[in-house]
Amino acid sequence: MKEISLATAGNGKFSRFRPRSGISGVINNLILVILALAVVLPLLLPWFFVFKTRLEFSYSPWSLPAQIQWNNFQEAWKAIHIGQGLMNTFWVCLGAIVCTVPAAGMAGYIFARYRSKVTEVIFYAVLVGYFVPVHMVLIPLYQLNVKLGIIDTLPGLFLPMTAFGIPFWTIIYRSFFRGLPGELAEAARIDGAGHAGIFFRVMLPLANPATILAVLLVFIGSWSDYLLSLVLLNSPRNFTMQLRVAQFLNQYGTDNMPRYAAAAVISAAPTLLLYIIGHRWIIRGTLAGALKG
Amino acid sequence: MFRSKAVVFVTLLLLVSLCFGLLATVSAQPVKLVVWGRDLPDDDPAHAYVKALVTGFKANNPDIDLEYVALGDPGLTDKTKVVMASGSGLPDVFQSWGGSVMGGYADAGRLLDLTAELKDLPCSPAAREAMSWKGKIYGVAPFFAIAGLFVNEDLFDAYGYAVPTTLKELEEVADAFLAKGIQPFACGARDKWPVLAFYMYLTDRYGGIETFADAQARRGRFDSEPFVKAAQHYQDWVKKGYFGDMPLSEAYGDAQQLMATGKAAMHITGSWMCAQYSDEDFTDQTIGFYAFPVLEGGKGKVTDIMGQTDIGFAATHVAADKKEAVVRFLKYTMDPEPCAAEPGRICSVPGVPSPSRLNEMASAVFGTAEVVQFWWDQDLPPMLTAPLNDAMQNFFIPDADVKSVLTEYEWLVEDHLGPAK
Amino acid sequence: MKNGTGVHVLPQTTILHRRKREKKKRDWNSIIFQAIFLLPAIAFLLVFMYYPIEETFRISLTRSVGLGDADFIGFQNYSRLFASTEFRAGFMNVLAWAFWSIVIQIPLAFFIAFSLTAYRNRLTGTLRAVYYLASVMPSAIVAMLGRFIFAPRFGVIASLAEALNWTWLGRIDFLGNPDIAFWSVFAVATWTYTGFPIVYFMANIEQIPMEIRESAQLDGATQGQYARYIVIPWVSYAIRIVAIISTVGSLKLFDLPWLITSGGPVHATTTLAIILYKQGFVNWQYGRAAAVGVVIFLLSLIFTVAQFSIQRKGGDVN
């Protein structure tokens, strides 16, 4: 096995790679920056509204506020009750991750490396879960939860979420595992590892990028879920934080845009924070994936 | 002998005190009432009624444990449907707009018949009718909305126009505003449902109040003359530019914004807008509410009014063993105490003072009503309302053939309700 | 490829086949292992996915109003559906949506992903974070932003047109003109849905082993050649996966067209999932809603199977 050198593993130093000639490099960067601006600028739009009164907003939505009004944020913050429901959200996210990621990872591994007629058929069977639009199953799902006695409980929420997430992440894991070279598995087998050994010691660590992506995205997805939480939970004591926030957002809208914008900013903030913290892990994870020997 | 009497007496005493003890525990348990509503009971002025309702009821009824859950819109309607469909997890009381949607739930046996308890509650006949279905009363409607003409009085005064009372005068005023660069009517056609308010009145003014009722009862067709004439009239207005250059991209919120800033002169919509249009924080224009004008030579009268439940509540069958508590709650929703807190809606309870001039005007118009036709999308069975809204959007397309659009809708109605006689 | 011991080694799958040919008896270890690993996923799906799916198939053959019993009416729901103009519009819209998603979003995502991995500098990490940011936003907020931008009179574009006196721009009816509305909503969708493919492609491109990168550079390949002859074949499987995700996502599309234009004007931006929602939750026609669901389901299945079998014919990658 070659030595693994972290320094050259793509940590920003492609100095040995012949760089693009000056102009095309600059154009390339310019395009990227413009595209990035196209992403960021719309996110700034609500900030034009949040400090205005409704009247000021009606007359001139895009001007700078004449006077900074803080009460939109204050009212929105008071009404959202951030903190209430936080524990519920936490349990739901945790449950979703713990159930989805291992199940999808293990299944994806089998579909990638143990291909047979049987597993192909099962793969399609798993895949069909991805074809289901949520509204289609809301009512049967509600009735199912009632039958199983888990209606209005947190497991009753994250177990169906898992079922919705597994097909997607199975596809992703399968593609990741397929992309891994076979010699490593072969070498481990020669060293005497069994099926499970190969998986846990060799393959799984190599699929770190996928796992990190999965954990992060399943977390964010279950954090911001609205529809399933609305339908499958009845008592306010079980409501997740995002559900409360979404309910709050539904109160306003067109007739109080500044307050709605303030609420939107507050509601997006946790997701944004999670994302900012989490995305560093993605980079670290994908860098680790670039270590090949 | 004395001993046996003593034994009997003591046993009786024990039994009686046991009974009392049981009764005491039972009545000491607070009755739990779960109410699903739309608005959060917070400090927003638009939510003042709900806040007063919830806090007031809890204060006045310490023996009832009220759990009010605010689900927002569309959260409330979506969740109610899911729960009604499955039949379990129903709340005791839920906010409802009556009409055919509530009727569907009633037909499926999900609701609680409260005719006996609520029939003598003082309220407007239209409000009571709205929350009844097939002769039985299932809930209350503390606030009832009517459709009418909101007029920017500042603009009218500035140019010296009088508020129109006939459609011809209305069009003259519209032309005048158009010439001055002011959009005559705000609408909100992008959201589809706002289109209905004007169409209901036009059809009524052409064919009379029975037109829609006949078509729905299958005594007439939806592509009969009044409907088609009204549609063509609507389309003419769109072509003339009365609804602006790009009426289909104007959402209901945009329409409100236009009225609030004086860029539109009139708005034909429901009286629920009274709160915003009289709110200084929302608009600095003076806006008034008037009855929809009549069509000279048409069959509709100015006293034909289109209305619907603004805020209403109905009870489900799971509350059957808590009837007394439920009725107490429903009666409290009609109590002047919380009703007085509402900043804009027309109250169905007599004797509640109007919170604003605009509300007074709206209530006055409501007071003149001789016949109230329910908003079509509350009156028609649910399967026909979305197609109606989709069909009406066609009026905003200048080269659409409105008659064939209406005929297609008629076919759809025939599929569900049978052919017209 | 050679491993450290100099033995010429074949990819894993070939080895498995060889093994099978050598040992005529079943490899029970392997089968048990596979079964155990597949069990959790299948269990979850069986309970929470297949039962609702089966229910939906069943309801689609009835005239259900969602309350109480339903009469069996065979395929009437389907025939009514296919005859309805709204359904046909929704059907064409989702197909068009899938097509343009693949044609526009995938090349865009690949371009960005490649540029960010192959030519790194300080900006790369930040840029990647930014691009993905858009897909993390909940759809309600994305729709709200879309409305802000495209609204008439007071929207960003309209206000900009007024300020710059570009009347041609102000006259474009982004949301009210049936022909343009589709593209306005599609633009918003591209904004939010391109983030995941970018990140996914990047993760795949970064898996390309150092030797390959270095040998390409030693051979004097330009960026363009490197992209065309090495990177694209390497990530072609990932591209197919994204194509499937985009297609199925388009077939299921609901949030953005519903929140921005309510599926309008008339039926210009309606989708199959919007029709499902309207039939189920507004019209109370659960039978018909279930039928739409089945259509979405079957279309997804057809497209996905087609995608995977094209790929198999083309031979495995790597």
Image (cartoon, coloured by chain):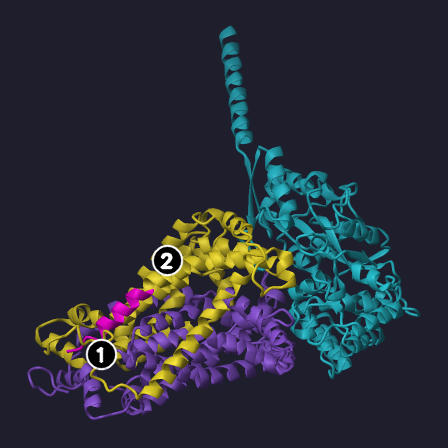
> Is residue B208 at all visible to an observer of this figure?
yes
Q: Eyeballing the image, is A120 above or below A67?
A: below
Q: Which mark is residue A180?
A: 1
Image coordinates of residue B214 in percent, x first then y, are: 82, 67
Instruction: Chain C: give its colour.
Output: purple
Q: Mark 1 to mark 2: distance in Å?
A: 29 Å
- As drawn, is A52 to the left or to the right of B116? left
Image coordinates of residue B37 in percent, x first then y, are: 60, 50
Does the magenta stretch mainly form a helix, a strand or a loop?
Answer: helix
Q: Residue at x 87, y 55 (%)?
A: B370
Label 2 CA crowd tier, 10 Å (few <14, some 14–19, many 20+): many
- As drawn, is C208 to the left or to the right of B289? left
Residue type (three-letter) at the residue carrying disc 1: Leu
Image coordinates of residue B242 in percent, x first then y, are: 77, 73
Location of the N terminus of chain A by quadrant is bottom left
Instruction: Chain B: give its colour.
Output: cyan
Residue segment shown in magenta? A279-293
Residue A285 in the magenta stretch? The answer is yes
Q: Eyeballing the image, is C294 above or below A244?
A: below
Q: Report the chain holding disc 2.
A: A
Q: Residue at x 25, y 78 (%)?
A: C207
- Chain coloured yellow in the rendered structure: A
As helix, strand or loop, the secondary structure at mark 2 comes to helix
Discs 1 and 2 lie in a common subunit? yes
Residue B351 in the magenta stretch? The answer is no
